[in-house]
Image: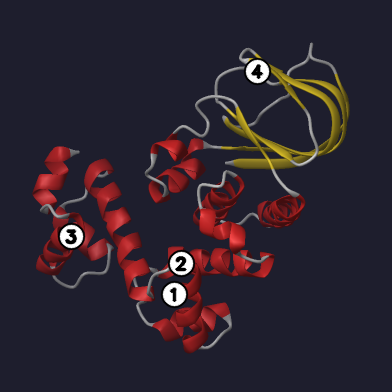
Amino acid sequence: MIQLEVIKGFYKREKALPAAFPMRILVIKEAEGYLHMNSGDHKLIAGRIFFIPEEGLVRLDGEIQFAYWLTFSSILYAEFLLQHLDPLAKNLFLKLSYRDLDANEFKKTTSLIEQLRKEVDARRDVAYLSQYLSLFLGYTSDLDGYLAALSLDELQQVLRFRAILEQFYKTERSIEFYAQGMGISSRKLNLFLSKVLGKSLSSLIKDRIMREAEMLLLHSDHSVDEIAKILGFEQTSNFHSTFRRYKGVTVNQFSHLG
């Protein structure tokens, strides 16, 4: 599903950089030389992060003092796309692109990626890793502009909340439950969600439930009654009315549109 390693040493363009999974990111901490692909040659610069398309071999030419090589599956990438519906997100890996991070951005990026490496080594589940990657991609690609203003501690809190929400959104609705999981008071969690994510807990839970509803309606063989039960609705009629208010179309209309 995901592989993250530190790479160092001398590289020659005759030998392609091996990738375990199709989605690929190269984060340069210190290096001299070039990244070569069919689309062109790109200089290896400290603080540069490359988002590399699925197609094409990656060839390095030069010396890598320290870089992170991250590859992951499209299954993990899917959560990022569900959270980012704009074309910029969908195009992130369609062609080679990169960002040059300033010192503060790079410090946060390396802290996040080091923590991700620990989570991978700890064999965290797919749901958690998909949330981590979604936050990491949103931050490093600058598609989630609000994340840039957050401290590293606040970024970690966003991740912690997303991970807890991902695990319990179908069954838990109370602010007290999520506050306990975060290790803070209900009041502080309400303030944090309002300040950082701009939404209440109930809105965030509803957003996540409706995204799951869309996925199940379009990509599963479950009946509407079964989907309502999976998502924690006691009555299918409640699921129908909630979905219509949220999407502006009925369940049947959405299924046919898909």
Q: Mark 4 or mark 2, which is nearer to you? A: 2
Question: Which of the two discs, 3 and 2, labels the residue nearer the N terminus?
Answer: 2
Q: Earlier in the sequence, mark 4 or mark 1?
A: 4
**Who comes first in sequence, dot 3 or dot 1?**
1
**Which residue matches tag 3?**
243
Distance from label 3 to label 1 (Cα)? 24 Å
Circles 3 and 2, Cβ within 8 Å, touching? The answer is: no
Location of the N terminus (image quadrant): top right
Q: Which residue is mark 1?
A: 194
**Foreground tag (3 vs 2):** 2
Give the CA separation, mark 3 to mark 2.
22 Å
Do the residues under discs 2 and 1 have CB atoms within 8 angstroms? yes
Specify the amino acid type for callout 1.
Ser
> Which residue: 78% across, 22% down?
34
Mark closest to the chain's N terminus, 4 or 3: 4
Dot 2: what SS? helix
Left of 51 or right of it: where is 205?
A: left
Q: Amino acid at mark 2?
A: Leu
Marks 4/3: CA–CA distance: 44 Å
Residue 41 lies left or right of residue 159; in this view the side is right
Q: Quadrant of the C terminus?
A: top left
In-image side of 15 versus 119 (left or right): right
How crowded is the residue under tag 1: few (<14 C-alpha within 10 Å), some, or many (20+)?
few
Q: Nearer the viewer, residue 43 or 15?
A: 43
Mark 4 = which residue?
57
CA gap, disc 2 and disc 1? 6 Å
Residue annotated with mark 2: 197
Q: CA distance from mark 4 to mark 2?
A: 38 Å
Query: Quick check: can you spot residue 216?
Result: yes
Q: Residue at x 44, y 63 (%)?
A: 166
Q: Does residue 85 appear to the left or right of 33 in the view shown?
A: left
Other residues around mark 4 within 10 Å, as few (<14) / some (14–19) / many (≥20): some
